Image (cartoon, coloured by chain):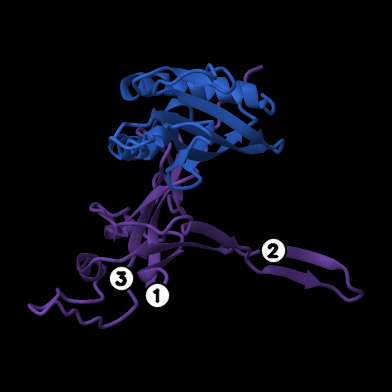
Chain colours: A purple, B blue
Amino acid sequence: MAKNKVIAAWSKCKVEFGFTGENDAFAAELTDVGYIKDKSTELSAEEGDALQLVASGGEVVAEDQNEGTLQLVTTVIEPSAALYKKLGIAEDEDQSGEQKVKTHIVPGDVSVKVTPKNKGAKGIKAPVCRLSVAPAFDEESGNALILTFKITKTTGIPEVGGEDQNYWYSRFTTTAALT
Amino acid sequence: MAVKGTTEIELEMYAALQGLMEETIRGDFYPSGTRPVTATTEDAVLTVSNAGALQIEEGRARLNIFVPGIDNGGEALVPDKGRLRELEAIGAQVVKTLNDADTDYLFELLNAPTSIQVPGKQEWFVNIALQFKFLTFNE
C-alpha cells in the first residue's frame, strides 16, 4: 500500500512574528525578521519534571509528568533598524543614523510563525511566546540578532461547549514554495 | 522506496535540468560519459559522482559546461571570460530548478561556480558543484 508522501521541511525557512491578540489569539499582523543565518533556526523541547509519590518501602504509588518547555531560536543577519523598532526594544534611528537600544526583552506576548521552503511541508504557528533578543557581533559574521521565542501554552482562549481550546502551537501545511 | 543508485539520480537530475540547459547553452546536454571526445561545442555534462546509503541519502554532483576558447590574435586561444561569467551566474538557477522539480531532493551549491581549463585543450569549463540529500522513504 502506498504511504502518504513525506515533504521535508528542510532547508531555508521564513520566521515571522507579531504581537499576540486578545484572548491569546494568534497575531493578526506579522513581520518577517529578515535574512536568517543559514542553519540557525531550531525548535527544541525540554521534558517537564517527573513527579512520583513513593510509599514506605519504595513502592511508587502515583506518578505524574509536568509539561515541558519549547523554544525556537533563530539568528537574524544584519538586523535592520526597523526590526529593532518593531520588536519594541528601540526607537527609530535618529538623523545621524544612531539608534538607542533600551532593552533586550520584548514587551508583551508575541506570536511566531515558521514557514519552511517546500510546498506541502509542515510549518508551525505558536500564538503565545516570550521573546528575548541577544545582539551579537564578530569580525567573521558581522552583526546578528539572536531571537529566542519561549513558547507557552495559551490560557485565554474561551471554552467552546465546555471544552478547553487552549493549545501550545499549531502545525500547518504550506501552500506555496518560498522563493 | 529505497536508496537510489547514482545513474538513476543522474537521469532524474538530467530530466529536471533539460529545459534550463536548452535555454542556456549553445550546444548539447549530456549525462556523464556520453559527450563525444572530439566535441568542440558549448556542451554541458552532468555527473553524479557519489551517493551514500543512509535513510537520507547524501551525495555530490557536478554540472560542467564546456566553453570553447576565443582567438585574441595571440598564439593560443584564450578563455571567453564574458561567456564563462554568464554561465557561472546560473548556479543559483540550477539549484532552484532542481529543488522545484522534486521535493524528495534538497540541492545546494557545494562551492561557488568556478571556471577551469580542460587539460591539454584550448577549452574551458564552468564547474557547478552540487551536494544533495534525498529522502529514501517516500513511495
Q: Please tell me how crowded label 1 is: few (under 14), some (14-19), or many (20+) other residues with Cα within 10 Å.
A: few
Q: Please tell me how crowded label 3 is: few (under 14), some (14-19), or many (20+) other residues with Cα within 10 Å.
A: few
Question: The residue under label 3 is which amino acid type?
Answer: Gly
Q: Which residue is mark 1?
A: A139
Q: Chain of mark 2?
A: A
Rendered image: mark on residue B52: none
Question: Where's residue A70, x and y in %?
Answer: 52, 61
- N-term mark: 3 or 1: 3
Q: Is mark 2 in CB contact (under 8 Å) with mark 3? A: no
The vertical placement of B25 against A134, above or below, is above
The picture quadrant where one finds residue B80 is top left
Identify the residue at horizontal 38%, vertical 28% (top origin).
B68
Question: Where's residue B44, x and y in %?
Answer: 45, 25
Identify the residue at horizontal 37%, vertical 73% (top origin).
A133
- N-term mark: 2 or 3: 2
Q: Which residue is mark 3?
A: A108
Q: Which residue is mark 2?
A: A64
* Closer-to-camera residue (B16/B47): B47
Q: Chain of mark 3?
A: A
Please identify the residue farthest to the left as the structure is shown.
A95
Q: Secondary structure at mark 2?
A: strand
The vertical placement of A106 against A118, above or below, is below
Disc nearest the viewer among 3 and 1: 1
Question: Where's residue B24, x and y in %?
Answer: 33, 25
Question: The residue under label 1 is which amino acid type?
Answer: Glu
The vertical placement of B138 against B82, above or below, is above
Left/right of residue B50 with respect to residue A122 in the rendered view: right
Q: Are marks 3 and 1 on the same chain?
A: yes
* Closer-to-camera residue (A130/B75): B75
